[in-house]
Amino acid sequence: MDEAEERLRSDEEEEEEEEGEEAWDDWCSDGDDAAGRLLCLFCSSWFDTDRSLFEHCAAEHCFDLHRIVKELGLDFYGCIRLINFIRSKVAENKCWSCGQSFSSNTELCSHLHAVESHLIEGKVQWEDDVYLKPFMEDDSLLHSLSMDDDEGDEECGTSVERGQCSGGNGVLAEPLGNKLRTLTEGTGSDISARFERECTIGSAKGEDRESLAQENNDSQLKVARASVNARAVKTVDDNYFGSYSSFGIHREMLGDKVRTDAYRDALLANPSLLSRATVLDVGCGTGILSLFAAKAGASRVVAVDGSAKMASVATQVAKNNGLLYDENVKAEQKQGAQVISVVHTKAEELNKKIQVPQNDFDVLVSEWMGYCLLYESMLSSVLYARDHFLKPGGAILPDTATILGAGFGKGGTSLPFWENVYGFDMSCIGKEVTSTSARFPVVDVVASQDIVTETAVLHSFDLATMKESEMDFTSSFELRLRDSSTVVPGVTWCYGIVLWFDTGFTERFCKEKPVVLSTSPFSTPTHWSQTIFTFEEPIAMVKEESTIASSALVGTDGCPATIFRSRISIVRASEHRSIDISVETTAFSSDGRKRSWPIQIFNL
């Protein structure tokens, strides 16, 4: 009897434990389901894993992602583009492959069919970088996307054809070969809410598919969200414009002779452009560009700034210099070039402050560039002003911008400083500082002698014609050691990639005197400096073929690389006015072997 009671109590306790576990699971799922479940690409079905979702898509909607990845050689970014492309088409009830339109999602799902070829004139439909931005806000599928790599590239020892490099578009692409995992979270921003910090290379050989899928599900790359709420944008804007209320930053910019002289020359030395012209100055600050334009003979200058303090300051500066426009003074009573009006507003809201005829200005001038060119994202305001206020064929100054990059050596890091501090070796600190730099971009001046590779052009913008979506881009390029007396014979170590930009006031508009504003390491330093992206591990490089140890890893002293390829993506981050940069690097030895490093993600 006692044994029976004991078994009964034991059964009751087990039932209570099971009920408790179910209640706990229910409580957990209540908080997690909405954020973690994955919506089918085509219908309204929901799934717990990306694997089950794509199995459903293959069985029910004739969409086999793994087959498409294998056929086209899509990498992670190519998959992101494809998913966002499909979601955009399904939202319009259009077939993603053939483009046929339907009146309902039910009809669309009934129509879906297998696709024989995804290439149209050698390109896929989702090639545009606009599809790197999530189409669906809070798309959990993008946050949890994993990629199985059954045929992953070997870390080294694999022969490759020169010239083949993944572009994420299915053309001359290599398998990704990377499994993504989470790096320790950074500080100072919500980077972890947009990107996981790192990717790590691993081989799928010898592992069964289930364990690999689990690893990949655990290793996620969170993609920047396409939109943020208006309150967050306003907060960032308020902080942004507030930061420019400090005179210190304006002292630094005005004291930057490279910057200020370039704008002065472009405005004052091109009379055919400025004489009697109407000018819009976006982000006027102290009003220096407006003052140049007035001095150059402009008939009217409207200066716009989002900072109330700086708009007030620019007004006072124009008044003190006899250049402030006063609508209450009759034309015959005006003295000199009283042509400047200052408006406190963002360019996007100018029409709410004053009446501005549509596309009425002859010239649009702005000093909008930030670190790495695109930080602060003021370019979008300039493009808005161009489209709404500039005359057709009107001049935009500057009218071109180009991002360039090169590899830098040990002198571009802090290591030399720490190796000899008043005669003491503190290199242990230098190594830790350099390791930290591999997670965060550094804005600093790199000396020309510390550039060890050739220079590559990453991307060029035509500001007269570009679209806002073109601010997000991906560039693939390759770098070799440069011909220079600073690159000594033997092994040279490349510690990372440094980016800078040039802007041009070209002959298109500045016919008398074209001007180039350069922030290159080979030019006079500017307040923009350069933007430094440090590798997790330096790459050993040689200029000529050398003796190679068969077992050594590519990029090490025993097997130095003769070339390395990099792919850099720069996109606007979910945090307004910030940018996210990803860096992928693969080194190649003279015997054709290669080695890839984990993708590095930076936020600026």
Image (cartoon, grey):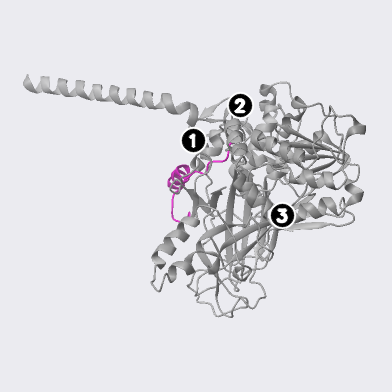
What numbered label is drawn on residue 43? 2
- Residue at 80% x, 36% y is 387
Q: Secondary structure at mark 2?
A: loop
Residue type of the residue flagged with mark 2: Cys
Q: Amino acid at mark 1?
A: Thr
212 in the magenta segment: yes
The amino acid pointed to by label 3 is: Arg
Q: Nearer the viewer, mark 3 or mark 2?
A: 3
Distance from the alpha carbon under mark 1 to that under mark 2:
16 Å
**Is residue 505 at all visible to an observer of this figure?**
no
For the N terminus, which image quadrant?
top left
Residue nearer the viewer, 37 or 18: 37
The x and y percentages for residue 496 are: 56, 62
Q: Is residue 456 left or right of residue 219?
A: right
Choose the circle earlier in sequence order: 3 or 1. 1
Residue 335 pos. (x, y %): 87, 38
Magenta residues (range): 204-225
- Could you say which disc has been placed on residue 259 in the image? 3
- Rate crowding at label 3 as few (under 14), some (14 to 19) or many (20 or more) other CA atoms within 10 Å: some
Instruction: Identify whether 101 is placed above or below 178.
Output: above
Q: Answer with left or right where residue 409 lies relative to residue 421.
A: right
Residue 454, image x and y in percent?
67, 68
Mark positioned earlier in the residue sequence (1 or 2):
2
The percent coordinates of residue 143 (x first, y second) are: 53, 38
Nearer the observer: mark 3 or 1; the answer is 3
> Mark 3 touching mark 2, by CB under 8 A?
no
Label 3 SS: helix
Q: Is residue 522 above or below residue 602?
A: below
Q: Is residue 167 above or below residue 96?
A: below
Q: Give me the residue at 60% from left, 38% from top.
A: 240
Other-residue count near label 2 (Cα within 10 Å), few / some / many at <14 / 14–19 / ≥20 = some
Return the residue nearer the eye: 421 or 341.
Answer: 341
